[in-house]
Image: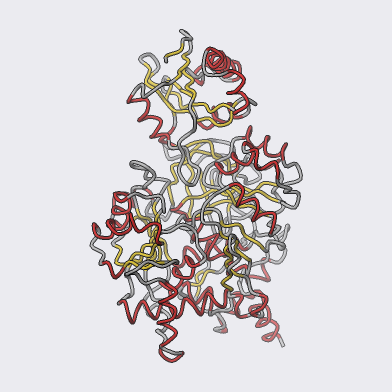
Amino acid sequence: MTDLFLRLVVGTRGVLYAAATEEHRWSDVGRKIAQIAVQKGWVPAVESYRSECGRGVARDSPGRVGEDTEVSVIVPTSLPIWDFIFDSDYSPLRRVHPTDLGAFVNAATAERIRYDEVKDYATYISTALVRDHGLQKGDTVAMFSPNTIWYPVALLATARAGGIVSGASPAYNVEEMSYALTTGKAKYLLTVPSSLAVAIPAAKNAGIPADRILLLEGEQDGYTNVQKLLEIGKEYGDDGQVSPFKFADEESNRDLCGFLSFSSGTTGLPKAEIAKEQVMITHHNVMAQCMQIQQIVPPDYKKTLAVLPLFHITGLVHLMHLPILLNTEVFMLPSFNMTSMLNTVVDNKITELLLVPPILVRLLQDPTAAKFDLSHVKTFTSGAAPMAEGFLQKLENRYPWTGFKQAYGMTESCSCITMHPFDKQSYQYAHHVGTIVANTEVKILDPKTGREMGYNELGEILARGPQVVMGYLDNVKATRETFDAEGWLHTGDIGFMDEEGFLTITDRIKEMIKVKGIGVSPAELEDLLLGRNDVADAAVTAIPDDYSGERPKAYVVLQSSEKERVGDGFGLVDIGRDIIEYVRAKKVRHKWIVEVEFVKEIPKSASGKILRRVLRDMEKKGTSGKRLVVRDERVKAKL
C-alpha cells in the first residue's frame, strides 16, 4: 500500500521535490518520497544539491543567504532533455490526455502545434536530419530566425539527435552572423526566407555547404524546409525512426554541452549587439532551471506570451522548455509590435506578461497601449535588467490592479538566480529582484578584499547551483575568470541582500563611476532621473574629469509631451539645468551630474540592457551632427 501511494505521488506530480508551502512543512515528506523513489528505481539516477536557498532566511554565514529548512528539487543527471520533456514521469504527456495538452500557437494565424505533435514532428525531423543530411552527435545547428512555432520543434529535433543548438539574433548582419557561425563551429544553419540574404554569405564564410542551409518555414527554390524534412522522416515509418540520443554509462547530462548562447553579461559586448563569448549550456542546466521555476509558478498560470526572442536564454528556457513541462499554451509573435502584442494579450486573456524593460517603457509611453483593456492582466514579469523605482511607480499608477515579478540572472546562470515567489509579487517588493530559487546559493563579496559581506552591505554577487553553466566555448581564460574552482559564478553585478532574503541589484563592477576614488552607481542616478515626470528614459555613464578622475554624465530622453512644449532651443537648456539642480538637491556631492545630453533614444541590447559602451564611444567621437549638451558650473549649451 505504501509503495502504491509513493508511485502515485511520483507519477502524478511528475517532478520530485519538496512541496514549498509557506512554512515548508512538507519538505521532509517530499525529500523522503524522492529518496525512496530513487532507491526503488522508479526514477533515473539523480543528484540532489543541498539547498541553501528559497525564501531567503539567513544562515550563520554573514554574507551567504540560505534557508533554514532545505527546500530542494531533484535534478536528473542521466536523462537527456528529450526524455525529460517527453518520455519520463516529469512530462505532461505521461499524465495528461492529448486533447488537454498545451501547444505552441502562432498568434497571427492561430496555427497550433500541440505538444504531442511537437514530439512526433521533432522525431520525424531528427530522423531526416540524421539519415538524409548526416547530422551526428555533437554537431552544432545554428538557428537564425525570428520567433516561429517551428523553432522549438527544430530545436528539440536537434537535441533528440544529440546535436548542439546555437541561437543567433535575426538582426545580425553578414559579419556578425559569420562570427556567430564560426565561433560556434556550426555545421548546419536553420533560417527563414527573409533572412537568406544574410544567411547565405555568412554560411559561406563559415564553411557551411549550401545544402545544409535549411528553412524553418516558408519556401525558397533550392532549399529544403522543415515541413519537407517532416515528410521525409515520416516515410521511414515507425520502425525506421532514429533512436533518441542517450548518455553513455560514463556520461552525465551535467558534462556535455547541449546549447550555445551568446553572453550579454560577464564578459562584455564587442561592437553592435553581438557578444564576445558562446556560453556552453548543458541539458542539466535547462532541466534544473525549469524545475526551479516550476516551484514558484502560480497554479493558474496557463498561458504564455512569447514576444521575447527565442534565441535568448529566456526564450530557450521560459518560452520553449518550461511551457511543455507546465503544460501551458505559448502564443508566439515573430517580433515586438505594440498593437499585435496587445491584441494577442486581450484576445487570449493572457494574465501574466513576460516582458523586458524597453517594452514596459513603451507600454507606458505608447498612446496605442491606452486603447486596450488590460483589466484581466494580473502580473507583469521582467528580467534582463533592473527596473528603476521611479518607473515602477509609474507602472503601478497606470495598472494599480496588477502585481510585478522580477527575475535576476544571466546567460551564465541559464536564466534565473532569483525570482519573486508568487506570494511576494506586489509593487511593495518590485524594486528587489526576488529571492534565490531552489538548489541555489548566493553570497556577497567585497570586490577588493574578498570578504563575505553582511546584510544590506554592497558587494559582488556570486551564485552557485545546478543551473550555472559549464563555461565559455574555447575560452579557458574567460571561464576561469568567471567561474571559480568551487563552482561559484562571479556575476560582476553589485548588490546586497536584506534580512528577508531579497536581493537588490545596484550596478555592475565595470560600470561604476569613480569620482575621486569613490564609486558612484549609474543605476542609482538613472533611478532618480526616471522618477521625474518629464523624463521618459535615461542612462548615466562616466566622462573624464581632470580634477576628479571621472564625473557622471546623464543621457536623457524627454517625454514626447515635454518635447512638444519646449521645442529644441533654450527650453531644453532650462530643463537640462533643472535636471542638474535636481540631482544636486537629492544626492551627495560626488554623485552630482556634470552634464546632461538630450538624445532621441538610449541604446539598449535586445534584452534591455543599456549599452554604455555605445554612449562612451559616442562621447569619444565628439560632436556627430547636432547635439545639445548642458554642462554644470558653466551651464552653457554646446550645439
Q: Is residue 127 visible?
A: yes
Name the residue furthest top: 634
Q: Give the percent coordinates (x, y) of residue 406.
A: 61, 47
Name the residue furthest front: 221
Name the residue furthest bottom: 239
The quadrant in which the N terminus is found is bottom right
Picture quadrant of residue 132: bottom left
Give above or below for 450 relative to 485: above
Give above or below for 195 relative to 99: above
Q: Residue visible at 72% across and 36% down?
A: 397
Q: Give the percent coordinates (x, y) of residue 301.
A: 68, 61
Give above or below for 120 relative to 273: below
The answer to whether residue 250 is left or right of residue 503 is: left
Q: Give the percent coordinates (x, y) of residue 236.
A: 41, 88
Give above or below for 116 relative to 197: below
- Seen from the viewer's position, the closer of residues 172 and 94 is 172
Q: Residue visible at 41% across and 53% down?
A: 169
Q: Residue visible at 51% across and 50% down?
A: 409
The quadrant in which the C terminus is found is top left
Number of labels in the image equals 0
Picture quadrant of residue 273: top left
Q: Give the percent coordinates (x, y) of residue 228.
A: 41, 76
- Colour logic: secondary structure
Q: Is residue 480 visible?
A: no
The answer to whether residue 352 is left or right of residue 258 is: right
